[in-house]
């Protein structure tokens, strides 16, 4: 038995009481009426405890004993412990008793011992002592003497104050450690109890029933768990198939709840977004293009899931995206119906514009519109040589999608793949993507969009791909990016009996028109900038190009023998050249820095970047200078001048007035304006360096715009390329022109159309010409751009535009 107690005395000190705590009893015993001469030590008067440092170890809070009561059942043992702890915490070690010297400590204690003297420190002394303790809790003799002299204290007072303070800190630390150990002990005790309970009632982790230990082997138990996991995954896939694929798939029989009651993390129609009833799940989904009406398609009333997602970390967020993609697909099918009152047909029948009043009345949008943004909606129908399944595959691969629409997509990437499809195809594929969609001009900011792309098969030879924005990317620079959001947009592709496919394209978006220069606003309002007809025309032109290049006997005007592999190698080279040209105008793909120059107007842009030495990449400082102007001639007339090598010397200052002779010409389709050519300067009057340099040029032309891109290449590198060699090592710095119709209304110039609506009239009006040069300023990456370089390139652009106007007689 262990006892713990203390002595209490009244003011007279006549009686003393001994409080004993017994571990074998819940009550505390108070032993009273013990005379003070039975004690081992003489009674100490109350003033002894005025020193807080010593009181921490010698006395409890005596004032509270009379209140608690030491005798009988009124005493509570926890109160006594709290009293001791509260007293200890309330003392700071700042009150000290004058401790006797060594001789006095050896003197035996007795009743005749003189009463000890105590000293209470002043607040200033306490503050200084505490500050010294923080700096050094173990001062030496010299430091104690200096501190005592400064505070008017004796050396032993300083010494014992530090001892008491260290004792106090040690006690506090031990109490804290004991508390932590006690908490950990309680946790272990609870875990031990839980483990014992689990061992008494084992549960099978595979089926959830009671487990009988020892009756099955470890391998069999593992197979049962794996079987349960596979059945759970099958049930999930059945729900996704019913919702997105349209072909019901029954789950395997087993001891699992039915599909309608199964709690699925990724099940669309669950979590409060509506459900798929038996009638809905049994409906076959198809698309009848003969009537333009969905065949037995049950269109669910679209909900309004949150479209702006910071990430795809939780099943709930994925279910929202699945629901959004499903609603977007339903809206696209409605918009692609033939003879739909949702569309106005243009006068020439080439495209259709969305009837926003009818759209608002009949369709609940998947995402809400934002005030202050301009909305555009167009639809176009065309034929393609790509079948529907390959078309869906191409749209779901970011790099192939960008290559199929050159000049329109600056960059694109797949951010997350939510579903890769079913049965090895893209049926039901859903992914999050980011893209930069552009017009080749510094006056039109790039459209950066973050969107969901969802592909789905709606029957044999019928596929649909839909895009819908989930977030507006506005982190780019204000001068290069435009706030834009895509409503459900995309295409429905149907295979035709003649081997072609019918493409119905819908573009529906909203954008900030205030960031677009007034010269290009009529072009965007007409739909010829980013509209559906522009996408279809670019698709058709690229399909013709790929068919011609891949054919071993395509139309060509080669003036020298070139192999089919050489044609493909040259096609890869000009593809990289055109992509670099567009990136230099729209500030995509590379890290461009805009240079602010005082003499450059608002219709021009000057940028630089550091070229890193690599395959096909020059090393040094590259300057890109771009200018957009209005030319009062028709786009076709302007294109004919710029793509003709024989007339190049009339505007090209770098040709030094020499005639260009065409060496190789590869057609990219039936249109003579789409081709790849290789020309050289006429040797007469030229230097040897000029005769060794060739001009590689690619031209692209349709009703919605033209591109003429060229670059100087050396003869030895092109000989390797034309023989089918690797073209990635050829270094090129492209320059060129981009032409679009101005789409001005019945006006004679750009100053008369500000603030007016417009529609593009084919064969009339002027052109918007963008001129861009990329020049190597210095081969040192650390070099700085000089004023002379800026003036040189500015003079080059100005004189080039002046030469074009003189050649067209439009000064």
Image (cartoon, grey):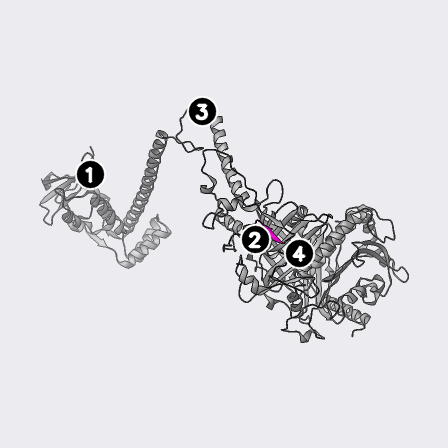
User: Could you tell me how far apart the alpha carbons at marks 2 and 4 are, in whole angstroms?
Assistant: 26 Å
User: Could you tell me how far apart the alpha carbons at marks 4 and 3 are, in whole angstroms?
Assistant: 60 Å
Which of the marked residues, 4 or 3, is nearer the chain's N terminus? 3
Residue visible at 16% across and 39% down in the picture: 28
The spot of residue 203 in percent (x, y) is: 40, 32
Residue 294 lies in the magenta-colored region: yes
Which of the marked residues, 2 or 4, is nearer the chain's N terminus? 2
Which of the marked residues, 2 or 1, is nearer the chain's N terminus? 1
User: Could you tell me how far apart the alpha carbons at marks 2 and 3 are, in whole angstroms?
Assistant: 51 Å
Badge 3 local density, few (<14 within 10 Å), some, or many (20+)? few
User: Could you tell me how far apart the alpha carbons at marks 2 and 1 are, in whole angstroms?
Assistant: 82 Å
* Disc 2 target residue: 330
For the view shown, which residue lies furthest in the front direction?
Answer: 291
Which of the marked residues, 4 or 1, is nearer the chain's N terminus? 1
Badge 1 local density, few (<14 within 10 Å), some, or many (20+)? few
Q: Is residue 271 left or right of residue 756?
A: left
Q: Secondary structure at mark 3?
A: loop
User: Could you tell me how far apart the alpha carbons at marks 1 and 3 are, in whole angstroms?
Assistant: 58 Å
* Disc 1 target residue: 4
Residue visible at 74% across and 55% down in the picture: 541
Tag 1 and tag 3, C-beta contact below 8 Å: no
Choose mark 2 or mark 4, whichever is in front.
2
**Picture quarter with the C terminus:** bottom right
Which of the marked residues, 2 or 3, is nearer the chain's N terminus? 3
* Disc 3 target residue: 216
């Amino acid at each position: 038995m262990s006892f713990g107690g203390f002595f209490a005395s009244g003011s007279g000190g006549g009686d003393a009481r001994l409080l004993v705590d017994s571990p074998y009893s819940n009550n505390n015993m108070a032993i009273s009426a013990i005379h003070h001469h039975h004690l081992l030590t003489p009674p100490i008067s109350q003033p002894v405890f005025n020193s807080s440092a010593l009181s921490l170890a010698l006395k409890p809070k005596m004032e509270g004993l009379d209140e608690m009561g030491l005798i009988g059942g009124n005493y509570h043992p926890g109160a006594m412990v709290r009293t001791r702890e509260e007293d200890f915490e309330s003392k700071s070690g700042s009150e000290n008793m004058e401790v006797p010297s060594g001789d006095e400590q050896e003197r035996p204690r007795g009743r005749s011992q003189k009463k000890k003297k105590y000293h209470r420190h002043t607040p200033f002394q306490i503050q200084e002592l505490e500050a010294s303790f923080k700096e050094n809790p173990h001062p030496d003799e010299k430091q104690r003497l200096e501190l005592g002299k400064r505070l008017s204290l004796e050396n032993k007072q300083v010494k014992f104050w530090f001892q008491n303070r260290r004792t106090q800190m040690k006690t506090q630390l031990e109490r804290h450690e004991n508390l932590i150990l006690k908490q950990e002990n309680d946790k272990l005790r609870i875990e031990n109890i839980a483990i014992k309970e689990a061992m008494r009632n084992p549960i099978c982790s595979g089926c959830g029933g009671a487990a009988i230990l020892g009756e099955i082997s470890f391998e069999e138990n593992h197979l049962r768990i794996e079987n349960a996991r596979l059945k759970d995954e099958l049930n999930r896939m059945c729900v996704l198939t019913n919702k997105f694929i349209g072909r019901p798939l029954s789950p395997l029989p087993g001891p699992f709840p039915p599909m309608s009651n199964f709690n699925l993390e990724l099940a669309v129609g669950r979590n409060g977004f509506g459900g798929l009833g038996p009638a809905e799940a049994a409906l076959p989904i198809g698309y009848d293009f003969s009537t333009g009406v969905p065949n037995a398609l049950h269109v669910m009333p679209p909900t309004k899931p949150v479209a702006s997602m910071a990430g795809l970390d939780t099943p709930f967020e994925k279910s929202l995206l699945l629901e959004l993609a499903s609603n977007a697909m339903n809206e696209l099918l409605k918009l692609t119906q033939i003879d739909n009152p949702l569309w106005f047909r243009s006068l020439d029948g080439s495209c259709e514009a969305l009837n926003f009043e009818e759209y608002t009345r009949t369709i609940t949008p998947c995402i809400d519109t934002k005030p202050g943004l301009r909305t555009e909606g167009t639809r176009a129908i065309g034929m393609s040589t790509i079948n529907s399944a390959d078309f869906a595959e191409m749209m779901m691969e970011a790099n192939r999608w960008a290559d199929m629409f050159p000049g329109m997509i600056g960059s694109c990437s797949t951010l997350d793949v939510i579903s890769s499809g079913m049965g090895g195809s893209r049926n039901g594929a859903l992914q999050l993507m980011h893209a930069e969609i552009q017009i080749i001009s510094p006056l039109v900011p790039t459209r950066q969009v973050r969107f969901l792309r969802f592909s789905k098969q709606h029957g044999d030879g019928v596929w649909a791909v839909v895009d819908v924005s989930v977030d507006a990317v506005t982190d780019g620079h204000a001068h290069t990016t435009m706030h834009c959001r895509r409503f459900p947009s995309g295409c429905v592709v149907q295979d035709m009996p003649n081997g072609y496919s019918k493409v119905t394209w819908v573009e529906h978006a909203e954008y900030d028109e205030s960031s677009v220069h007034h010269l290009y606003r009529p072009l965007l309002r007409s739909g010829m900038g980013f509209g559906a007809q522009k996408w279809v025309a670019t698709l058709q032109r690229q399909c013709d190009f790929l068919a011609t290049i891949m054919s071993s006997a395509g139309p060509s005007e080669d003036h020298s023998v070139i192999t089919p592999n050489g044609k493909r190698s040259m096609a890869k080279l000009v593809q990289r050249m055109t992509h670099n040209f567009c990136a230099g105008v729209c500030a995509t793909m590379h890290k461009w820095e805009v240079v602010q120059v005082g003499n450059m107007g608002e219709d021009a842009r000057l940028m630089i970047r550091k070229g890193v030495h690599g395959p096909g990449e020059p090393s040094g400082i590259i300057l890109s200078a771009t200018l957009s102007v209005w030319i009062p001639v028709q786009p076709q007339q302007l294109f004919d001048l710029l793509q003709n090598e024989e007339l190049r010397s009339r505007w090209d200052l770098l040709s030094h007035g020499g005639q260009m002779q065409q060496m190789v010409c590869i057609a990219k389709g039936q249109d003579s304006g789409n081709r790849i050519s290789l020309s050289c300067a006429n040797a007469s009057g030229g230097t040897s360096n000029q005769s060794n340099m060739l001009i590689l040029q690619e031209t692209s032309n349709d009703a919605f715009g033209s591109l003429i891109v060229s670059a100087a290449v050396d003869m030895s590198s092109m000989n390797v390329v034309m023989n089918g060699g690797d073209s990635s090592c050829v270094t090129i710095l492209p320059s060129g022109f981009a032409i679009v119709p101005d789409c001005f209304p019945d006006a004679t110039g750009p100053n008369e159309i500000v603030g007016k609506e417009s529609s593009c009239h084919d064969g009339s009006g002027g052109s918007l010409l963008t001129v861009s040069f990329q020049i190597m300023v210095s081969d040192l990456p650390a070099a700085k751009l000089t004023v002379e370089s800026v003036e040189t390139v500015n003079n080059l652009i100005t004189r080039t535009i002046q030469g074009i106007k003189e050649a067209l007689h439009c000064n």
